[in-house]
Image: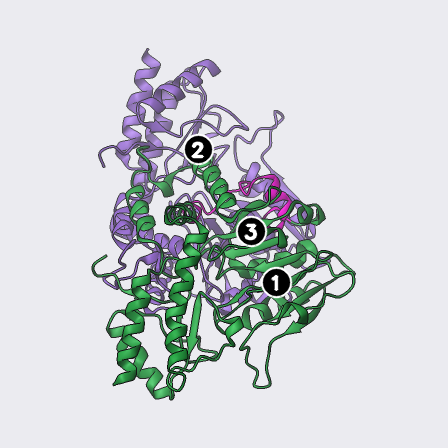
Chain colours: A purple, B green
Amino acid sequence: MSGRKWNFNPGPSVMPVPALEKAKEALLDYDGTGIGIMETSHRSKEFGELYGKLQERMAKLLALPADRKILFFGGGANLQFSMIPMNLLPEGGHADYVNTGTWANKAIAAAQLVGKVDVVASSKNDEGKFPRVPTPAEIQVTAGAQYLHLCSNNTIAGTQFHAWPDTPEVPLIVDMSSDIACRELDWSKFDLVYAGAQKNLGPAGVTVVIISQKLLDRCGDDLPMMLNYKTMAAKDSLGNTPPSFPIYMVGLVLEWIEQQGGIAAVEKVNRAKANLLYGLFDDNPDYFRAPVEKASRSLMNVVWRLPSEDLEKQLIAEATADGFVGLKGHRSVGGLRASIYNAMPSQGVEQLVDYLKKFAAK
Amino acid sequence: MSGRKWNFNPGPSVMPVPALEKAKEALLDYDGTGIGIMETSHRSKEFGELYGKLQERMAKLLALPADRKILFFGGGANLQFSMIPMNLLPEGGHADYVNTGTWANKAIAAAQLVGKVDVVASSKNDEGKFPRVPTPAEIQVTAGAQYLHLCSNNTIAGTQFHAWPDTPEVPLIVDMSSDIACRELDWSKFDLVYAGAQKNLGPAGVTVVIISQKLLDRCGDDLPMMLNYKTMAAKDSLGNTPPSFPIYMVGLVLEWIEQQGGIAAVEKVNRAKANLLYGLFDDNPDYFRAPVEKASRSLMNVVWRLPSEDLEKQLIAEATADGFVGLKGHRSVGGLRASIYNAMPSQGVEQLVDYLKKFAAK
């Protein structure tokens, strides 16, 4: 796309051009119906078809176990931080959480409003930073925990889980907002996965929840429909008007992933893109300082520092002017960050690496 | 728009063509930034500007009192049914509700999960139908009620409030999902108004809440951020990633309303459109049977019956084939319904009236 910039923002973030092109055609006339996609009733045959196809495609692409239900909510991952304990942490129960930084912390705080929380592992170091995620051996669940919660990828710290705790007796719940669909996974390990769409699945405004029948059976009955996994599952998330256009976009993004060759193919590209950046850092460790331990490096959010904050500011300013947007690290940690989600083309990362090399050489 | 059908669906529903055209241009490149609108960070200067302008425009168009805060939520009006009592019905308190049919009933049921509810007025008749809304005189609040709740327009029954209860001592809360921005109102009467966008304001996926400082001050402190009016107001609804594209569309729809000449101009057209249909019914009462009492007729959702269900089915089938979509009444009441929101052009209603006349003449 001429005129398009390389968008390294952490979310909302870059989306696949073919999905955007297709949406463009559907705004005034969806699929020859004479009605735009945003104007299409969620009770229509057309929406029903795209919705069914989307769920089918997601189940197939992710290779979900047969009993998993795919639900859609508004309110972002933040609402899930509360809904999970509201549905699954009954009075007198307790739940285990892993602390890997900001997002995990927000989930912990939300759960503490509902019930007893045990933080069973943390990767916080003496400086208050999170340069890694805990190993599976470090994560020991408490007896009788209702569930174990962790955040698979921390967009701020640039860390990601590459090995999972094995807790057959305690259901594993994962906030996969920033790395869902980036790699092949054994989904039978997870009883509940949730993800705000605005990184790897679509635009902001819809959150996907993938939940096992086992957990659905454990949900309480006394919550209002919009906060109740069981009711939402019984109504296939269509008990009220869903965020239909964001859902439609998720369908287009999944279609694009399928066209790339599926999750395995996307993962291969993601690993190659990440290796380009991490390779540059490892070859020039005095200039490009990668704070994350190698075993915990994120494929999605690559963070680094330069020798001085002045140099960092200069790089961000120059890169922005030259068409590389969104490289500023999160305000809580500073430094630089390149978010290279599925939809970021290899070319974008290659050009960024060249740019960084030239900047370092100056 | 050639190829566009007349879309009389109750929601998601017809949107203004100029807003859709503008969105189309922004999907791959918003305002020359080189980044599509859905890909634009909610922390960016660009989004901040459009968001500020949207709030300013809404406040001006609706002529809101100065202390009103405009908030944005996911989860639809259904989530507000629960949030209102969660925030504003403290333990031991009680709240008054008016029952005008389906949506009011859902709000009542959601509030009953939280606390004590008094249904202080109802327009249900002996047949279980709701052919009108209560008069202000019929709505007597209970002593010490935390608030009075009503739904200003019932999309299913085709009724609308045209006079408001005067309850200076009890805050008035109104579900305006299907008629916000359709007419000039004295907004100082309302302490909290909420509206799912998918009828008169934009696409599904965002709900607007307009709340007075007085009510914000009364909200509890112990709710999670996403369910807490006070926290959301303190963060200007940007505590997490908002449904940015649906919000953007709301901005475009407001811009379009402004271009029409504002709410007064839109109201004039709305009254003319509604009069065309009601006029037809009143001139042919034996064939077009309008079940709603004249004083309660909705400007937005016009419902009617034909002499037989077979004729109704025939009309729906033929009209759909001829480009008039969405005329089927809600499954709970049957009959016919034309939803003629702001974005439905006069021409669409004129053509529908001609079509109905010809159908009746056959």
Mark in the foreground, 1 or 3: 1
Image coordinates of residue A161 in percent, x first then y, are 48, 41
The residue at which mark 2 appears reads as B44
Secondary structure type for disc 3? strand
Start-end of magenta stretch: B224-247
Residue A27 is left or right of residue B251, and the answer is left
The residue at which mark 1 appears reads as B164
Queried whether the magenta region covers residue B238, the answer comes back as yes
Name the kind of residue labelled 1 in the image. Answer: Trp
Q: Earlier in the sequence, mark 3 or mark 2?
A: 2
Dot 3 surroundings within 10 Å: few (below 14), some, or many (20 or more)?
many
Mark in the foreground, 3 or 2: 3
Residue drawn at x 65%, y 54% as measured from the top left: A145
How many numbered callouts? Answer: 3
The residue at which mark 3 appears reads as B209
Name the kind of residue labelled 3 in the image. Answer: Val
